[in-house]
Amino acid sequence: EFNAHLLLHSSVSARVREVALLRAVHLRGSEYLWDHHVPIAQRAGLTLDEIEAVRGGDVADPVDALVVRVVDEVEKCSTLTDET
């Protein structure tokens, strides 16, 4: 139900959703989900270079960089720092 809401009814843009999803999937080591979401991320406007940058954690776009940072913090600490 949560996934359906996120995919179909969320106000989060498709690009932001896919950056967050790809980063979380990478951190959890799921190549299956990574491979599944790469074409979805491309349809959401990410290039293959941007997708690989999400994997590496070194993205150029400031919004994408913030999304990667948020996912990293939540994965590591289950919370966000005040700075983020």
Image (tube, helix red, strand yellow):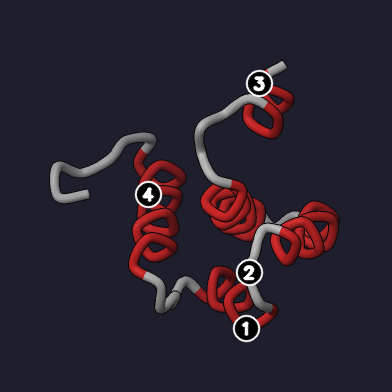
Q: From the viewer's side, name the closer residue of 52 and 39.
A: 39
Q: CA distance from mark 1 to mark 3?
A: 29 Å
Q: Nearer the viewer, mark 4 or mark 1?
A: 1
Query: Disc 4 vs disc 1: Cβ atoms closer than 8 Å?
Result: no
Q: Which residue is mark 4?
A: 70
Q: Which residue is mark 2?
A: 46
Residue in view at x 58 percent, y 76 percent: 50
Is 78 positioned to the left or the right of 57 in the image? left
Residue in view at x 36 percent, y 48 percent: 73
Q: Which residue is mark 3?
A: 2
Please tell me in which quadrant of the rendered image residue 78 appears.
top left
Which circle's residue, 3 or 2, is located before the other in the chain? 3
Q: CA distance from mark 3 to mark 2?
A: 23 Å
SS type, badge 4 = helix
SS type, badge 3 = helix
Q: Amino acid at mark 3?
A: Phe
